[in-house]
Structure formats: structure tokens, C-alpha cells
Image (cartoon, rainbow, N blue to C red):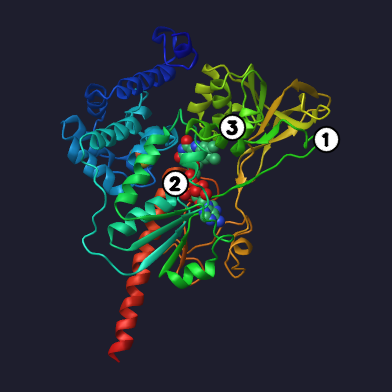
Amino acid sequence: MATQKMLGFVHTEQRMPEKRKAEARRQDFNEIYARFTDKGAVEQANRCSQCGVPFCQVHCPVSNNIPDWLKLTAEGRLEEAYELSQATNNLPEICGRICPQDRLCEGNCTIEQSTHGTVTIGAVEKYITETAFDNGWVKPIVPRMEREQSVAIIGAGPAGLAAADQLRKKGYQVHVYDRYDRVGGLLMYGIPGFKLEKDVVIRRWKLLEEGGVKFHLGVEVGRNIDMRTLRAEHDAVLIATGVYKARDLGGPGAGLDGIVPALDYLTASNRKSLGDTVLDFETGKLNAKGKKVVVIGGGDTAMDCVRTAIRQGAMSVKCVYRRDRKNMPGSQRETANAEEEGVEFVWQTAPEGFTGDAHVTGVKAYKMHMGVADATGRQTPLPIEGSNFTMEADLVIKALGFDPEEIPSLFGVPELKVSRWGTVQVKYATMMTNLDGVFAAGDIVRGASLVVWGIKDGRDAAAGIHNYIQAKIAQGLAVAAE
Ligand SMILES: Cc1cc2nc3c(=O)[nH]c(=O)nc-3n(C[C@H](O)[C@H](O)[C@H](O)COP(=O)(O)OP(=O)(O)OC[C@H]3O[C@@H](n4cnc5c(N)ncnc54)[C@H](O)[C@@H]3O)c2cc1C
Ligand code: SF4
């Protein structure tokens, strides 16, 4: 019970402000959901007023037909609700769990806007899909016809998986190449298991495999196989490689032991939970147990790090961010959860260096104040002179965001057009790059984004690839007929 309280699952409703009450109801529903009872889901679905202005749907990147599947759920027609929900979303069980719904569908629910607390759309989506899996309604793909054309997909993250699903349904021979040993990309190794259980990702992987998608794991494009070969062997290629170049911190002491990148830390934790032997975890390098942890950054990755550190039994966990709470990029809901779990937020603070001989012992920082807004309307943080101080730390996790790797040089295609940030440029109508038959989707196009946007891009790219291949076939037939 004490742990449950610490992790924010127990609420004393009477003392909470309205907004927190709504959140508490949501958590309670999640708890009901976790036991797979229908009551919570039907109650929630019944709360939808069918308002006729589906802002929830408009703000869902894959345009899920939310009001209709809520109605079907309320009527107990779950198989139909599932059919409708999976028609627009290739990974509904995953989005239901980890979409930042407060910024998307639920944040725009009319009932939420009228201060009565949102319909818990994500939880219902998860419930519908889990019920479908339990009842055997989710089946491996059986394409209506097999096509001889093949597509290579580089990257088995959400964008690659959504495209693979869509293309395989059309009967293409789909080959997914990934440098990791497991499918899922950040779903598997980035996002922690307390937000997204790994068996949920593995179940989807196996389902796609049963449906005929071929996964080539441990294959790094640019090292084990080159782009030229992929283009020669397949009718189209999709780049869905995500963004993995971690932004770094400088300053005196930046090279000390005990200062680690967020993704190394999260990957070690995820691998450990999957039963892998992780040397850096065993030696304590990537394990927060008993440590004074300082996480630098204010995004969702930082929230995942602080919450993982708490679960690993850290002595204390601080999150250092240079702006104030309302200007942080991370989800407000996750921040509130982290606070409830015991994380201390050190707002308007920037690191300037680290103390320690060989191993870090502290983070030197100074306070910031919020200055005038820049061209984007966001206030610029400015240092406060003489405000320097040092925080004790024996594990510092850098969670400052990610940039794209240099795809044109890595893949040996210098002519591939990228933006000044290194993201691959596409024509959005087709998702094709400037290279004929080479498409791109997900974070590598948008920069670090969200799972549901990756799915949307993967679906759009699959449509673009289908049109491209069909046009090529039609062209070939026309030439042959001349
Ligand atoms: C810690 C963390 C937590 C997050 N939490 C959330 C969340 O709660 N909700 C949410 O919606 N989003 C979250 N995100 C963002 C989300 O995970 C990404 O937006 C999404 O995974 C992007 O999908 P993708 O398919 O483009 O790329 P990825 O998921 O990154 O997948 C890319 C794949 O390509 C492979 N690859 C890369 N280069 C090569 C190569 N050369 N050869 C072969 N394979 C290659 C990689 O191994 C990887 O498997 C989080 C991100 C992080 C880092
Ligand atoms: S996919 Fe995400 S945004 Fe869309 S309905 Fe589901 S939880 Fe909401």
C-alpha cells in the first residue's frame, strides 16, 4: 500500500482540486481496466456526449473515429468497436497506453473543456484492443492476393511497423531491416516498461511475423548492407530510422564517470527487464539504486529517466530544467506523476559544469529567470548573476533531446536531401524523398516526435509506396503494349 501511495495510485479525492480529481478518476479507471473488467470502459464510453463536434477526432493524428467506437463500446458491441478502431490505427493497444492524450484527443474532449473531466479515450482504446486480443478477434494478416513486388523498410519502430502492416495487407513482400536485436525501436528500448509492457510490443511483432512480414534483425544499413543493394533488390525502400544522435552537455567535468546519456540508461533498464545480461547495469554504471540522481532536461525522456530511477530505488532524484513548469516540453501529466512519486523538480536552473575527480560528485548550476518572448512566443531563460550553487550527485543523466544521424553519408547516398537539422526531406503528398522509389517516415522526417505521428507517417508512406509501385507497373505495361 505504501508503495502504491508513493506511485500515485491511491487518492484522497476530498482534498483534491477539480483537475486532480479528474486525473484520479482516470487513474482509478486505469486500475479497473488493469483487471480487464468491462464496467469501467462502458461507464467511460457512456460519458461521451456524442457532441457532434468531434474535436477529439480532429486532434488525434490518425483521425480515429472516437465518438463511434465509444458509442459501440457503450452498447457492448466490442468486436465492432475494435474493427473500427483498428481501421485507422495499426497499434491501438500501444497508443491507448502511451499517447500523451492530455495534449491530443482527451485534451480536446468537449466534456474536458466544460471542466467535467475528459472521457478516458486512451484507456478505452486500450481496453477495446486488449479485449479483442483476449477473444481472438485480432488475426494475422492474410492478404487477398500475393504480389511479387517487395519493399524494404529500414527501421522496426512504430513508423516502420505501421508501413509494414499496411503494405503486407496489400500483398507486398515486406522486408524490415533493423540494427537492434528486437522489433519495436523506441517502443522496445526507449519507453520504460511501467508505461508500455514489453510483452505488448512482442505480441505485435509476432503477429506481423505470422502475417508474413520478414524481419532482418541485427542488420545495420550503412554497415552490414548498403542502400544501393536495397534499392536494387526491392521495388521501393522506406527510411524509418528514428533520431538517435543525443544532444550533449559541455562544461568543466563533462567527461567524468557517472555522467551518462538518457537512452543508454533507459535501454539498460529495458534490456534488464527483458532478461538480458547488461554488464553496465550489473556494475552499477547504469543503475540508480542507492544513488543521488540528477536528470538534466525537461522533456518526456527526462520524465522517463526520473521515474525509472525512482523505481530502481535511487536515494534521491532531482530533475533540473532551465525554464519554468509551464514552459517545459514534457507532458504535465507525467510531471505530476513524477512529483507524486517523489521526484524533486529544480526549475529555472541550468548546469554549468560538474565536480569530482574521476567520478562525478556534483552538478554546478545557476538559476535562470524567464526573459522576454522570442519570435516563437516562448520566453527565453536568462542567467541570474551570482546565483551559482552545487547539487550533490553520483549519477547524472543527460536527457537533452535527440537529433538525426547523418543519413546521407551513413547510407552512402550523399544526394539524399535533408533539412538543415538533418531530417530527411519528403514530399508530404507521397512521402517520397528526392530519390526515386525511396520514401521516409516517422522521427527521421519530423524530428523527435510521438508514436502516433510515426504511425500516421508510416500509413501515409505505405499509401505513397503502393501508388508508386502501381504507377511503375502501369508504365511498364504501357511501354510493353507500344
Ligand atoms: C525515452 C523516450 C520516451 C518516449 N515516450 C513516448 C511516449 O510516451 N509516447 C509517445 O507517443 N512517444 C514517446 N516517445 C517518442 C516515440 O518513441 C518516437 O516518436 C517514435 O518511436 C518514433 O518512431 P520511429 O519509427 O520514427 O523511430 P524509432 O522508434 O526510433 O525506430 C527506429 C528504428 O530504426 C532502427 N534503425 C536506425 N538506424 C538504422 C540503420 N542504419 N539500420 C537499421 N536499423 C536502423 C532503430 O534501431 C529503431 O529500431 C518517446 C521517446 C523516447 C526517446
Ligand atoms: S491514437 Fe492517441 S490521440 Fe488518437 S485516440 Fe488513441 S490515444 Fe487518442
Confirm or reject: label 2 Cβ below 8 Å from ligand 1: yes
At label 3, which amino acid type do we have?
A: Ala
Point out the image quarter for the N terminus.
Answer: top left
Is residue 51 visible to us here?
no
Instruction: Tell which of 325 and 400 is nearer to you.
Output: 400
Q: Mark 1 points at which residue?
A: 252
Residue 249 lies, in percent from the top left, at: 73, 39
**Gap in angstroms between the C-alphas marked 1 and 2:** 39 Å
Give the image quarter of residue 368: top right
Is 215 on the left-hand or right-hand side of 211?
right
Is 154 on the left-hand or right-hand side of 24?
right
Q: Mark 2 points at which residue?
A: 183
Mark 1 touching mark 2, by CB under 8 A?
A: no
**Gap in angstroms between the C-alphas marked 3 and 1:** 22 Å
Q: What element carries label 3?
A: helix
Between label 1 and label 2, give the one nearer the viewer.
Answer: 2
Question: Mark 3 or mark 2, which is nearer the start of the sequence?
Answer: 2
**Gap in angstroms between the C-alphas marked 2 and 3:** 23 Å
Q: Mark 3 points at which residue?
A: 302
At label 1, which amino acid type do we have?
A: Pro
Is 478 on the left-hand or right-hand side of 439?
left
Confirm or reject: label 3 Cβ below 8 Å from ligand 1: no
Question: Mark 1 or mark 3, which is nearer the start of the sequence?
Answer: 1
